[in-house]
Image (cartoon, rainbow, N blue to C red):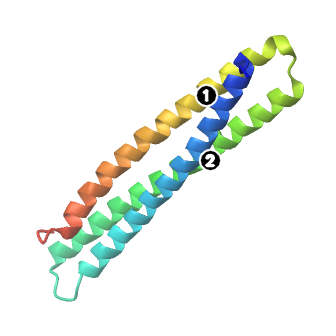
C-alpha cells in the first residue's frame, strides 16, 4: 500500500519525536558524566594541596557546574520543543481539513528537523567538553 504525502510527513514527524527523546536520554548520560568528573576533581582535592591548587580545583569545579547548568537548560528547552511538536501533531490530526493538512505537517516537520539537528550538535559539543574535562581530571598538573 502506498503512503500518501500526509502519511509520509506524519511518519517522519513521529520518527523525529522518537529521535528527540533518544537525544534527551543521550544528553542525560552526558550530564551524569559531567557530575562524575566534578566528583573526581573534588576527590583529587586533598588536605595537602596548596592554595594555588585549591583555586585551580575550585575554578574547574565552577566551570563544570556552569556546563551542567547550560546542559540542564538545553535539555529543558529540548523537552519543551518535543512537547510542542507532539501537541502540534495532535492539533493537526484533530482540526485540519484535507487541503491544509500537508502544509501544517510540513511546518511541524521542519521544526522537528531543526530540533534534531540542534540536539545532535549540542551533544557533539558536550562530548568535546567532557573529553577536555576528562583530560584535566586525569592529569596530575592541576
Residue found 48% across the figure and 53% down from its top: 26
Determine whether 83 is above or below 92 in the image: below
- Residue pointed to by mark 1: 111
Label annotation for residue 136: none
Image x and y of residue 120, in percent: 44, 40
- Residue pointed to by mark 2: 79
Image x and y of residue 141, in percent: 11, 68
Determine whether 1 is above or below 131 in the image: above
Of marks 1 and 2, which one's residue comes earlier in the chain? 2
Furthest residue toward front: 1
Q: In this view, does 17 lie to the left or right of 25?
A: right
Q: Which of the 4 image quarters holds residue 37?
A: bottom left
- Crowding around mark 1 (Cα neighbors within 10 Å: few <14, some 14 to 19, many 20+) is some
Q: Please, what secondary structure does the residue beneath circle 2 have?
A: helix
User: How many numbered circles does the render carry?
Assistant: 2
Nearer to the camera, 47 or 37: 37
Which quadrant is the C terminus positioned in? bottom left
Residue found 22% across the figure and 75% down from its top: 54
Furthest residue toward top: 99
- Crowding around mark 2 (Cα neighbors within 10 Å: few <14, some 14 to 19, many 20+) is some
Q: Which of the 4 image quarters holds residue 66?
A: bottom left
Q: Is residue 79 left or right of residue 10?
A: left
Q: Which of the 4 image quarters holds residue 96?
A: top right
Gap in Å between the C-alphas at discs 1 and 2?
Answer: 13 Å
Residue found 17% across the figure and 82% down from its top: 49
Image x and y of residue 92, in percent: 81, 27
Nearer to the camera, 92 or 15: 15
Image x and y of residue 97, in percent: 87, 17
Nearer to the camera, 98 or 52: 98
Amino acid at each position: 500500500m502506498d503512503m500518501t504525502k500526509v502519511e509520509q510527513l506524519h511518519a517522519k514527524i513521529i520518527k523525529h519525536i522518537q529521535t528527540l527523546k533518544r537525544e534527551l536520554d543521550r544528553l542525560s548520560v552526558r550530564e551524569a558524566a559531567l557530575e562524575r568528573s566534578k566528583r573526581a576533581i573534588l576527590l583529587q582535592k586533598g588536605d595537602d594541596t596548596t592554595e594555588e591548587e585549591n583555586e585551580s580545583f575550585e575554578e574547574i569545579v565552577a566551570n563544570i557546574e556552569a556546563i551542567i547548568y547550560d546542559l540542564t537548560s538545553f535539555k529543558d528547552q529540548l523537552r519543551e520543543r518535543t512537547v510542542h511538536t507532539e501537541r502540534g501533531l495532535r492539533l493537526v490530526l484533530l482540526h485540519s481539513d484535507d487541503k491544509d493538512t500537508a502544509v501544517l505537517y510540513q511546518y511541524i516537520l521542519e521544526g522537528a528537523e531543526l530540533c534534531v539537528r540542534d540536539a545532535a550538535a549540542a551533544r557533539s559539543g558536550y562530548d568535546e567538553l567532557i573529553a577536555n574535562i576528562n583530560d584535566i581530571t586525569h592529569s596530575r598538573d592541576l
